[in-house]
Image (spheres, rainbow, N blue to C red):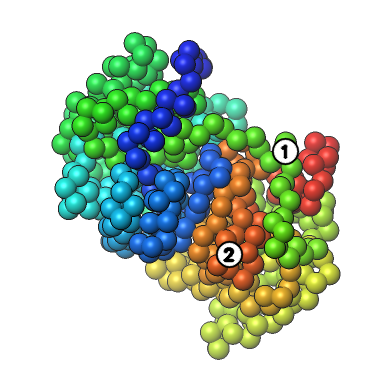
């Protein structure tokens, strides 16, 4: 798989931004878990926004991420939520006099509610008289080594590129799949013929000024899905320009993407990792605490090794939620949660602390629904513990380890309604948000750390950066 990072002579990002400005484009990114902003910076994240909140973003034409957390929902609930948010966004856009562009952001390893969410967004677009002509599907996450070539999604795995269908992600209990070819994968999800699914090849993107790519997109029609192959940032920029050319021919495009294409669509240059620049200082009104909180919900082997390394380097005080005691409790776990919250508060007054759940995953054999109920009870308890921390207990930062944990702790534990993405700790990985003024902890740095990202020392490195010790990361 040869890399040819060919960049047009003119600046494609400025061309993209120019068209977005002239066409009054406002990007609404419906993010099915909190990890979708890993390639962008300086953008707003909203939780369950109403028309007024979205209108304010539309007035400023700022790209807006809406955390739906729909990957954790049922098919029907995911579809209903996307319908609701699209209708709300259309109303806000009409009030602001802008053109909404919907990006359904999901997983670069193909896990998520592909068909239900596209069905919902297509339906709402048709309702308002803007039927979708083409769905452009771009799952690449270039920064993380997940690229698309020859209509196959490739994952960088132990130094080699492997088809996503041959990785552990394809065995997901909810979103598992076996199709290697993306055209077949799309057709299987939609219940359509492979012949209806088109694709833009790398050759089409890199040759002839991208005109062939634009023609493929413009000619698809009927709401057909077009797969966008991409191995580099330049490929994604060329694809964004091709989509804009198709739009100029009157096509209405809906996007389904991984994290990387969002940056190309909005024309944003890549940011410098915070590991290189250091963390920005707190806002003047922020009451910065001496100690930080890390919450670990992920149970991957990598997370466990990262936790051990972080405890060794930073001397973290560990407070464990005893899951067995929680589940066996006759009062719904109230005493277990209350005792754990008290212990965590006392710990945070004296040391950097980590709230962990028992490291053994609790499931119910042959009963998936009961296993999910157990997981929800544990998640509810973790959020309740964080929510019970006194508002006058200053925190230096909060790190949430695990995708679902990141959403639940932010929304239910800290009451987040909006936040600003400051950037990423490392290129395309581990986003740092600053909580908005509507929480009890405005301005608090909040780190979204996916469960299966990085190496053994990455969590320890993140904490070092948060504590202002860049030198520890290089050592």
Q: Could you tell me which quadrant the C terminus lies in?
A: top right
In this rendering, the label closer to the viewer, 2 or 1: 2
Q: Which residue is the site of mark 2?
A: 437
> Residue 455's x, y, as percent?
68, 41
| Residue 50 visible in the shown view | yes
Q: Residue furthest bottom?
A: 331
> Picture coordinates of residue 148 (x, y %)?
42, 28
Q: Nearer the viewer, residue 382 or 391?
A: 391
- Frontmost residue, 83 versus 300: 83
Q: Is residue 197 left or right of residue 344?
A: left
In terms of depth relative to the viewer, which is nearer, 316 or 177?
Answer: 316
Local SS, label 2: loop
Q: What secondary structure is found at the residue carrying circle 1? A: helix
Please tell me in which quadrant of the rendered image residue 434 appears: bottom right
Count of labels in the image: 2
| Disc 2: CA contacts within 10 A as few (<14), some (14-19) or many (>=20) | some
- Up-down: is 53 above or below 331? above
Q: Is residue 367 visible?
A: no
Q: Give yes or no for contact between labels 2 and 1 (Cβ–Cβ under 8 Å).
A: no
**Which residue is at a point 47% across and 58% down the rendered structure image?**
46
């Amino acid at each position: 798989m040869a890399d040819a990072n060919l960049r047009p002579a003119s600046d494609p990002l400025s061309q993209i931004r120019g068209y977005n400005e002239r066409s009054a484009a406002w990007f609404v990114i419906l993010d099915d878990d909190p990890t979708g902003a890993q390639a962008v910076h300086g953008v707003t994240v909203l939780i369950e926004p109403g028309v007024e909140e979205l209108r304010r973003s539309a007035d400023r034409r700022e790209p807006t991420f809406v955390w739906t957390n729909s990957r954790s929902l049922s098919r029907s609930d995911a579809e209903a939520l996307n319908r609701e948010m699209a209708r709300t966004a259309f109303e806000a856009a009409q009030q602001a006099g802008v053109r909404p562009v919907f990006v359904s952001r999901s997983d670069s390893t193909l896990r998520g509610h592909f068909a239900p969410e596209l069905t919902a967004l297509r339906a709402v677009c048709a309702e308002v008289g803007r039927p979708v002509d083409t769905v452009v599907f771009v799952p690449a996450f270039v920064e993380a080594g997940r690229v698309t070539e020859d209509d196959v999604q490739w994952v960088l795995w132990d130094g080699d590129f492997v088809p996503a269908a041959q990785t552990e992600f394809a065995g997901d209990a909810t979103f598992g799949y076996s199709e290697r070819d993306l055209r077949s994968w799309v057709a299987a999800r939609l219940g359509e013929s492979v012949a209806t699914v088109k694709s833009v090849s790398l050759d089409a993107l890199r040759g002839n000024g991208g005109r062939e790519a634009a023609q493929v997109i413009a000619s698809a029609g009927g709401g057909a899905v077009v797969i966008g192959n991409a191995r580099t940032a330049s490929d994604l920029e060329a694809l964004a320009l091709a989509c804009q050319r198709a739009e100029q021919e009157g096509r209405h495009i809906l996007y389904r993407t991984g994290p990387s294409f969002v940056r190309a669509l909005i024309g944003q240059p890549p940011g410098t990792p915070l590991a290189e620049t250091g963390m920005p200082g707190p806002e003047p009104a922020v009451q910065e605490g001496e100690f930080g909180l890390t919450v670990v919900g992920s149970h991957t082997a990598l997370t466990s090794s990262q936790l051990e390394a972080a405890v060794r380097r930073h001397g973290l005080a560990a407070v464990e939620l005893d899951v067995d005691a929680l589940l066996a409790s006759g009062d719904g776990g109230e005493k277990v949660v209350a005792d754990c919250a008290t212990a965590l508060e006392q710990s945070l007054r004296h040391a950097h602390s980590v709230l962990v759940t028992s490291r053994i995953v609790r499931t119910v054999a042959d009963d998936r629904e009961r296993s999910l109920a157990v997981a929800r009870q544990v998640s509810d308890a973790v959020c309740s513990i964080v929510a019970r921390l006194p508002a006058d207990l200053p925190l230096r930062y909060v790190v949430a380890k695990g995708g679902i944990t990141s959403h639940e702790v932010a929304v239910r534990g800290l009451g987040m309604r909006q936040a600003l993405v400051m950037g990423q700790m490392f290129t395309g990985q581990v986003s740092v948000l600053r909580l908005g003024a509507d929480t009890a902890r405005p301005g608090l740095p909040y780190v979204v750390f996916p469960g299966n990202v990085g190496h053994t020392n990455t969590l320890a490195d993140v904490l070092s950066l948060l504590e202002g010790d860049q030198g520890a990361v290089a050592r």
